[in-house]
Image (spheres, rainbow, N blue to C red):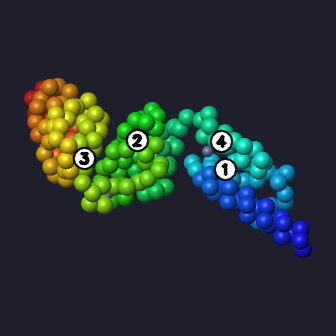
């Protein structure tokens, strides 16, 4: 009886360590034999790892896919989809680049992949205000420049000054800036077509 109790204590302790590293221990208490047996663990990116408890604890990034692995567009799309979001880009470079994501209510939100994996919050849903950085990111997506430099709180409807990649100057709101629609460019395209 003492043994069973001790075994369970080990299991509980190990599970706490696994969880404190943001992982999930899949192997149940019943399946747990001792520390010398492999266990199944789900990494924060949902990869299943089969590993010795000792190896798990000593590795900073125990998941081999996460440690050396570059995420693909499909990984990112699947991750967003699981959370009810949609990844709106057709390419994925790295987790430091800002990308567009669509929230479950259909608002478009810009965040780096790194930020998105940590927290999925939509300013529009939470009725939070926008700041200049949001507008700068939106502009950057299309090679535009945001010319407003007044650092204050804005709403998605506030009009800020932009220059498009063809040098047109205009004022527009956050939603339009996200779409990258410059009326002068669009008018020009219509004339040419
Ligand atoms: Zn992983
Ligand atoms: Zn939203
Ligand atoms: Zn333009």
As measured in the structure, the alpha-carbon distance from the residue carrying label 3 to the one carrying label 4 is 36 Å
Of the residues tagged 2 and 3, which is closer to the observer? 3
Label 4, on which residue?
60
As measured in the structure, the alpha-carbon distance from the residue carrying label 4 to the one carrying label 2 is 23 Å
Q: Are marks 2 and 3 in contact (CB under 8 Å)?
A: no
Label 1, on which residue?
48
Seen in the image, is 70 located left or right of residue 83?
Answer: right
Which mark is first along the chain, 1 or 3? 1
Q: Are marks 2 and 1 in contact (CB under 8 Å)?
A: no
At which x and y percent is residue 44? 58, 50
Q: Residue at x 77, y 62 (%)?
A: 11
Of the residues tagged 2 and 1, which is closer to the observer? 2
At which x and y percent is residue 141? 30, 35
Seen in the image, is 9 located left or right of residue 140?
Answer: right
Of the residues tagged 1 and 4, which is closer to the observer? 4
Give the structural element (helix, strand or loop) at label 4.
loop
Q: Residue at x 16, y 34 (%)?
A: 147
**Residue 131, disc:** 3
Which mark is first along the chain, 2 or 4? 4
| The C terminus sits in image quarter | top left
Of the residues tagged 3 and 1, which is closer to the observer? 3
Q: Residue at x 76, y 50 (%)?
A: 53
Q: Are marks 4 and 2 in contact (CB under 8 Å)?
A: no
Q: Are marks 3 and 4 in contact (CB under 8 Å)?
A: no
Of the residues tagged 4 and 2, which is closer to the observer? 4
Label 2, on which residue?
112
Which mark is first along the chain, 1 or 2? 1
Which mark is first along the chain, 3 or 2? 2
Q: Are marks 1 and 4 in contact (CB under 8 Å)?
A: no
Crowd rating for badge 2 (residues with CA inside 10 Å; few <14, some 14–19, many 20+): some
């Amino acid at each position: 009886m003492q043994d069973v109790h001790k075994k369970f204590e080990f299991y509980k302790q190990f599970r706490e360590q696994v969880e404190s590293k943001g992982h999930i221990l899949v192997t149940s208490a019943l399946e747990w034999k001792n520390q010398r047996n492999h266990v199944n663990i789900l990494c924060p990116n949902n990869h299943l790892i089969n590993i010795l408890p000792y190896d798990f604890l000593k590795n900073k990034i125990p998941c081999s896919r996460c440690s050396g692995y570059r995420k693909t567009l499909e990984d990112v799309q699947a991750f967003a989809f699981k959370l009810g979001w949609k990844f709106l880009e057709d390419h994925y470079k790295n987790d430091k680049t800002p990308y567009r994501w669509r929230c479950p209510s259909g608002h478009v939100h810009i965040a780096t992949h790194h930020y998105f994996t940590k927290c999925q919050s939509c300013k529009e849903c939470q009725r939070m205000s926008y700041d200049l950085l949001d507008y700068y990111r939106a502009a950057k997506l299309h090679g535009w420049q945001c010319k407003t430099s007044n650092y204050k709180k804005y709403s998605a409807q506030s009009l800020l000054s932009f220059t498009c990649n063809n040098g047109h100057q205009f004022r527009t709101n956050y939603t339009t800036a996200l779409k990258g629609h410059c009326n002068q460019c669009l008018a020009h395209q219509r004339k040419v077509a």
